[in-house]
Amino acid sequence: MKTPIIIYWLRQDLRIADNQALHYAANNGTVLPVYIWDEVNSQEFTLGAASKVWLHYSLQNLNQNLENKLAIYTGNPLDILLELCTRYKITQVVWNRCYEPWQINRDKNIKHHLMTKNIQVTSFNASLLWEPWEIQKKDGSYYKVFTPFYRNGCLQATQPRQPLAVPREISYFQAENTLAVEDLSLLPTIDWYSKTLTDWQIGEQGAQQKLWWFVEKALYNYKEGRNLPAKRYTSLLAPHLHFGEISPNQIWYVVKQLPEEQNIDCFCSELGWREFSYSQIYFNSDLPWQNLQRKFDKFPWQHNQDKLRAWQRGMTGIPIVDAGMRELWQTGYMHNRVRMIVGSFLVKNLLIDWRYGAKWFWDCLFDADLANNSASWQWIAGCGADAAPYFRIFNPITQGEKFDPDGEYIRKYIPELRQLPTKYIFNPIDAPSAVLKNANIILGETYPMPIVDIKESRQQALDAFKAFSAE
Ligand SMILES: Cc1cc2nc3c(=O)[nH]c(=O)nc-3n(C[C@H](O)[C@H](O)[C@H](O)COP(=O)(O)OP(=O)(O)OC[C@H]3O[C@@H](n4cnc5c(N)ncnc54)[C@H](O)[C@@H]3O)c2cc1C
């Protein structure tokens, strides 16, 4: 056995290629790979139901890739790491950094305690192209607007790290008394999830396949195609990135090796938005719950449970919104364009606080990511950094016409509207009664009447904004 034994603590880096901490541990000793499930201490940021399902399968896949040597525990990570160090006389622990504020605090605390026991702790960046503190303005402040963040910050900074290969040889240490993935009870007792998983191959190999599928089949239509929810022109890499089954560096260097052109630039800038979200959460630890623009603290949000429920269930009577919400429920994913439409509808047409929307997404998305979700919802609500101004309100009917021109996406997720001619599918109340009858639709029975009038609710939102800005 190669000495010393080094604990490699895994969190959101569930892969073996391009893994800095694993690489270090494998090169310098025998690796004890550890995963700790600590639901109690993660408090309100405990994973949503969809994320737990993903994690279950991702850990299974990872364990296979680690030759079934993953040591799994539940409980307080500090206690468990200390216990392992004592039991096996280990003096080195490594991990890849996490950037959610509660994880940063936890890790600082653990590092401090381990170091007081003479245990060496080394951490690495394996999930961002640039560390948040590397991309700052000349005056030392952080960027609040995306374009300068990306163009003047990221693209002018040192090139991202080149990806690492899988370590040529890994010698593993087998710990005792470890749990199996199944013991974490991450899967719900009622099987709502099997069907949602059919389009996904969870784990590192699945992530690589998705990347290569995207490069071959979708990347060269990305710039325009990424706005069309009925087509598959985006990478669908988000959950794989969130769980660290693939690194942004692996993606970056695969696409950057291709001849330069606009689709590639556009795709890379979306990876840049991910970096921007992480920068925001790093410099604003209360991003998940606190309006970045504090004047929004006084915004007169409405508390309407019925409307919130209708939105969550895809029963608002506005087809593109309902299609999106049902896509989310049925697949654990929602197309980005539609995320913007349903988000705008919730906060602007229904005047419901963005935090309710973020919470629902957190529970339902396979790619639920605290930085991306919080930053995107704040952007939609108009209260975030570089946010869309509040008066720019998406019209969900014209958005449907523009981005789902044949009504294909709506028909896919709302079968009860399938027979409606495309002309009326974006707003069925405009259809003459004979057309509705022919399509077997009774509004209010087979499909809901709109829960709000789009024009009136738009005006109401503008009035509310004006009134609160004037205060
Ligand atoms: C209201 C709302 C909530 C969102 N919540 C999340 C979330 O919880 N998790 C999440 O990963 N993304 C979130 N997004 C951003 C975006 O919708 C998804 O990243 C994207 O749809 C994922 O699909 P894809 O992997 O095919 O993306 P692609 O278009 O193929 O993009 C590649 C990668 O770039 C990143 N990316 C793309 N668009 C954005 C963006 N606007 N902001 C930040 N990163 C981006 C993602 O990591 C994505 O996987 C949210 C957007 C909105 C409007």
Image (spheres, rainbow, N blue to C red):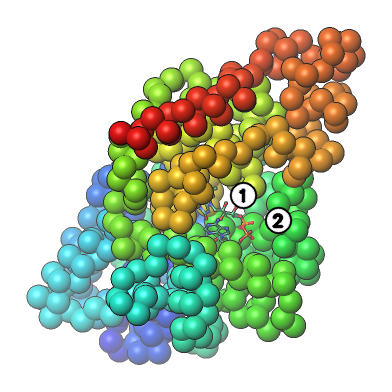
Please state which of residues 406 and 51 is positioned toward the viewer in this rendering.
Answer: 406
Q: Is mark 1 within 8 Å of ligand 1?
A: yes
| Outermost residue, front side | 470
Quadrant the C terminus occupies: top left
Secondary structure of the residue carrying tag 1 is helix
Residue 285 appears in which quarter of the rendering?
A: bottom left
The residue labelled by disc 2 is 226
Amino acid type, label 1: Asn
Secondary structure of the residue carrying tag 2 is loop
Please state which of residues 373 and 266 is positioned toward the viewer in this rendering.
Answer: 266
The residue labelled by disc 1 is 336
Q: Position of residue 69 (x, y in %)?
A: 43, 69
Left or right, 80 with respect to 415, comes to left
Q: Earlier in the sequence, mark 2 or mark 1?
A: 2
Residue 356 appears in which quarter of the rendering?
A: top left
Give the vertical position of 66 relative to 380 (above or below).
Answer: below
User: Is the Cβ of the residue at disc 2 closer than 8 Å to that at disc 1?
Assistant: yes
Q: Is mark 2 within 8 Å of ligand 1?
A: yes
